[in-house]
Image: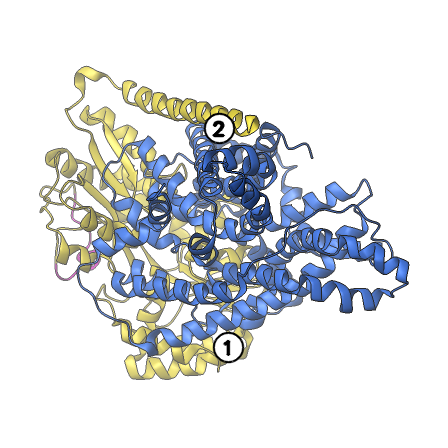
Chain colours: A blue, B yellow
């Protein structure tokens, strides 16, 4: 147990250690080469967070408006669906609409707009949970006292959830700060983010010492913000209250925005579904080993994520470990890819296992920050009570934490699987044989077959969603 | 608690079963060859993803070569073609590679500098000297294409010379892959530097800043914008147009014919001296230059063959003749950075 926490941190930071040994010549990158990138990364992540928080909060209030309706679960599922879509889907849609309006999406505004669209669902889900647990009980008091809607939100709700919202904003900020593909496409060539610079220095120019220094600086920056925001939080409690006086169902129109934004884009693809030749082309690209490989990747990623979560709940993330988990930004996929490629052994199974471990290491920190931290903090009081009563770490984990964590575990694991099964950035680097459906999508896209590629991307997402559903059933989550 | 235990157990069993299934498939794949004729080690060929994939020529070429040599060929994906050399070098001597496919004139100089390559004799024919790198004949060209813009005929009038790219009609309607992350993007910048000279090239990029060209991180995204987006013209291979002519019967996609010579993209194959099946590896490279292989590479890779007879009677013959620049060394990283600063709108 004494070595448990350092070993766990060592495992999560494994790619950085490996790179440390790999780099033979060290030098410090001059500030002028990365300073502007740091400033731009901060700027785009900040405004994206503001955008996502504003729209996400409105969205969350709309979700609350439907909380006792039969549409609640489908709307929540839809929100989740938008949250897990790969960046490429949003990027393609943005360009499609840009074409419609004959405008070129470029620069800070475009990046902020796409990041806002990508993260507003995440904020909505998080904020809905927050509002429900933090201000639920005040809702009835306010109703009895006849508080007006605006007063309720401005004077009661906002002060109560302010700190949690800042933490949620930090989650979005760290996602946007570490985003690679959106800034790469929409930034003007000169406006490079830190993540793009790490990719460029490491992969393209072989300047691994500079890439590593930048990764560590990025981590240090986010750690200091996490230190400020990550103070102790009161326990989350779910309340079933009537939200009617405070929210309006008309807010549901907001759901139409991403539906139309994405749906319209893919209309011409759906039209292709009716042409005979199209499906034979899709079938020709299919391979059973690729499906098997994707399934293996899904299962092993889920297994690894569950084990990581169980370990966290066993160790109890307090003080140092919590600060680490809150602040740690996984190294860019470029770094992870190179490190895992350098590991000895090249069999097909080893390649898939390396990919699963690599993706788990990449996804775990972000998902923990998003979903895990608030959950584990909410259990803190119970854990303290159990400790006072003399329960061992094993008893606390198995009897207090785990039974209450299945819901969160299913989300974290399910989302990791969804992203893993549709990943082609790391797969292209690590899979030496075409044993993945995502690789079929990628090669179709790079061989001019945009529509076939889109079908396989959707296939990957569907596979991930089915797995997600089955996992929740397996863990005993009923809705 | 019970739910987690049960889920972990089920996941463990499923993971094991899925790993076993992949392993069995992998073993079965090897058994499909006549074991008595197999050599001790497989011939290991590494290439870029699209060559290895179902869409590329790799799987068919390998199957054909296996029949001929009685050996097992392992066709491996090396990821991005710019990573080929990095990977071989980083893994050290224990990483066995017999044939490397997909180096181009931008990655080849580093390959020649960091690895030793065998000289391959008795080629079925000698590709034109202009395809070879000036510094070595150890890397054998197996396909090529001039690089130019592909445009939509019905939507925009094409440029005729480089200076036309500054015309307002192209503002916001052109995509070029980023030179920082993509080889075709580097080709574009190198083209301007070579055609106009480095000083005038920088001046050209300053004036291009007002044009709002899009610089996506990869060729795939850049060309995707032409296929499905607001872009009317994208920097790509001359041969990209043939895909639309053959597969989609769409002649709206046309290559731009510039008055200036355009850059060439040449793909090379080589056998590193660390090879284990060296004779078979050299045979494989010779096999790539045979008419049948050249034809397949042309059709699947949408690139021109180095054996020109193969073009006869195909759609590739309809492509316009472009003046091409000589294959030469890369321009400096600093110049590219400087040019990028100029092209960014302030």
Tag 2 residue: B8
Q: How many marks?
A: 2
Q: Which image quarter: residue A428? A: top left
Provide the residue span drawn in magenta. Answer: B125-135
Q: Position of residue A202 (x, y in %)?
A: 30, 60
Mark 1 or 2: the one toward you: 2
| Left or right, residue B328 beside residue A89 | left
Q: In which quarter of the image is residue B16?
A: top left
Estimate how packed mark 2 is, as few (under 14), some (14 to 19) or many (20 or more) residues with alpha carbons within 10 Å. some
Q: Measured from the top left, where is residue A443 in percent x and y?
A: 43, 44
Residue A286 versus residue A176: which sits nearer the camera? A176
Could you say which is closer to the camera, residue B103 or residue A427?
A427
B117 lies left or right of A470: left
Residue under pointer 1 = B211
- The disc, 1 or 2, on the residue closer to the chain's N-terminal end is 2
Quadrant assignment for the N terminus of chain B: top right
User: Badge 1 local density, few (<14 within 10 Å), some, or many (20+)?
Assistant: many
Callout 1 secondary element: helix
- What secondary structure characterizes most of the magenta part? loop
The question of residue B132 being in magenta is answered with yes
Q: Do discs 1 and 2 share a chain?
A: yes
Camera-nearest residue between A356 and A97: A356
- Asked if the stretch drawn in magenta spans residue B121, the answer is no
Question: Circle 2 marks a residue in which chain?
Answer: B
């Amino acid at each position: 147990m004494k070595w448990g926490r350092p070993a766990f941190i060592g495992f999560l930071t494994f790619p950085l250690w490996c790179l440390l040994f790999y780099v033979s010549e060290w030098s410090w990158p001059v500030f002028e080469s990365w300073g502007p990138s740091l400033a731009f990364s901060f700027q785009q992540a900040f405004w994206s967070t503001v955008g996502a928080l504003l729209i996400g909060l409105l969205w969350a209030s709309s979700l609350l408006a439907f909380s006792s309706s039969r549409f609640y679960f489908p709307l929540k599922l839809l929100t989740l669906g938008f949250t897990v879509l790969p960046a490429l889907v949003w990027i393609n849609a943005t360009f499609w609409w840009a074409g419609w309006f004959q405008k070129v999406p470029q620069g800070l505004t475009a990046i902020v707009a796409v990041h806002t669209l990508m993260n507003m669902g995440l904020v909505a889900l998080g904020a809905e949970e927050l509002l429900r647990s933090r201000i639920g009980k005040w809702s009835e008091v306010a109703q009895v006292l006849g508080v007006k809607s605006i007063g309720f939100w401005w004077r009661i709700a906002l002060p109560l959830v302010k700190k949690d919202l800042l933490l949620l904003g930090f989650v979005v900020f760290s996602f946007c700060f570490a985003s690679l593909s959106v800034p790469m496409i929409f930034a003007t060539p000169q406006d490079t983010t830190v993540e793009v610079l790490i990719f460029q220095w490491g992969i393209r120019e072989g300047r691994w010492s500079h890439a590593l220094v930048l990764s560590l600086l990025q981590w240090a920056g986010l750690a200091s913000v996490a230190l400020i925001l990550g103070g102790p939080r009161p326990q989350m409690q779910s309340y079933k209250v009537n939200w009617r006086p405070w929210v309006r169902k008309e807010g549901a129109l907001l759901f139409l925005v991403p539906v139309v934004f994405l749906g319209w884009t893919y209309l011409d693809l759906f039209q292709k579904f009716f042409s005979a030749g199209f499906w034979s082309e899709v079938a020709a690209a299919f391979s059973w080993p690729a499906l098997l490989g994707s399934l293996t990747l899904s299962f092993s990623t889920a297994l690894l994520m569950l084990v990581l979560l169980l370990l966290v709940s066993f160790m109890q993330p307090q003080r140092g470990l919590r600060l680490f988990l809150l602040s740690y930004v996984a190294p860019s996929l470029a770094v992870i890819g190179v490190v895992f490629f350098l590991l000895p052994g090249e069999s097909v199974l080893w390649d898939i296992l390396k990919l699963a471990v690599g993706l788990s290491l990449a996804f775990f920190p972000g998902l923990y920050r998003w979903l895990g931290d608030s959950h584990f903090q909410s259990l803190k009081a119970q854990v303290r009570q159990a400790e006072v009563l003399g329960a061992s770490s094993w008893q606390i984990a198995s009897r207090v934490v785990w039974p209450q964590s299945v819901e969160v575990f299913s989300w974290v694991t399910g989302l990791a699987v969804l992203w893993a099964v549709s990943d082609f950035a790391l797969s292209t680097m690590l899979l030496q044989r075409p044993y993945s459906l995502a690789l079929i999508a990628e090669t179709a896209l790079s061989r001019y077959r945009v529509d076939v590629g889109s079908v396989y991307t959707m296939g990957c997402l569907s596979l991930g969603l089915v797995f997600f559903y089955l996992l929740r059933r397996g863990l005993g989550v009923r809705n | 608690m019970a739910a987690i235990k049960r889920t972990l157990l089920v996941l463990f069993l499923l993971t094991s079963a899925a790993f076993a299934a992949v392993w069995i498939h992998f073993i079965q794949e090897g058994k499909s060859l006549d074991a008595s004729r197999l050599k001790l080690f497989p011939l290991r060929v590494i290439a870029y993803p699209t060559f290895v994939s179902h869409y590329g020529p790799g799987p068919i070429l390998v199957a054909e070569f296996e029949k001929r040599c009685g050996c097992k060929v392992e066709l491996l994906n090396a990821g991005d073609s710019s990573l080929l050399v990095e990977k071989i070098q980083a893994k050290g001597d224990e990483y066995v590679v017999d044939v490397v496919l997909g180096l181009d004139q931008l990655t080849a100089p580093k390959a020649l500098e960091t690895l030793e390559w065998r000289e391959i004799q008795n080629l079925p024919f000698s590709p034109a000297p202009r395809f070879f790198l000036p510094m070595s004949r150890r890397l054998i060209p197996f396909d090529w294409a001039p690089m130019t813009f592909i445009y939509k005929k019905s939507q925009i009038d094409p440029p005729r010379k480089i200076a036309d790219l500054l015309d307002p009609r192209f503002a916001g309607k052109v995509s070029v892959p980023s030179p920082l992350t993509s080889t075709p993007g580097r080709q574009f910048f190198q083209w301007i530097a070579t055609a106009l000279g480095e000083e005038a090239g920088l001046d050209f990029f300053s004036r291009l800043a007002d044009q709002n060209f899009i610089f996506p991180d990869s060729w795939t995204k850049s060309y995707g914008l032409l296929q499905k987006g607001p872009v009317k013209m994208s920097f790509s291979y001359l041969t990209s147009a043939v895909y639309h002519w053959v597969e989609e019967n769409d002649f709206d996609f046309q290559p731009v014919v510039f008055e200036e010579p355009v850059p060439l993209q040449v793909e090379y194959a080589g056998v590193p001296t660390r090879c284990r099946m060296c004779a078979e590896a050299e045979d494989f490279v010779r096999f790539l230059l045979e008419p049948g292989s050249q034809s397949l590479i042309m059709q699947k890779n949408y690139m021109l063959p180095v054996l020109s007879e193969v073009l006869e009677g195909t759609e590739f013959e309809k492509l316009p003749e472009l003046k091409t620049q000589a294959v030469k060394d890369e321009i400096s990283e600093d110049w590219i950075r400087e040019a990028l600063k100029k092209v960014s709108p302030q």
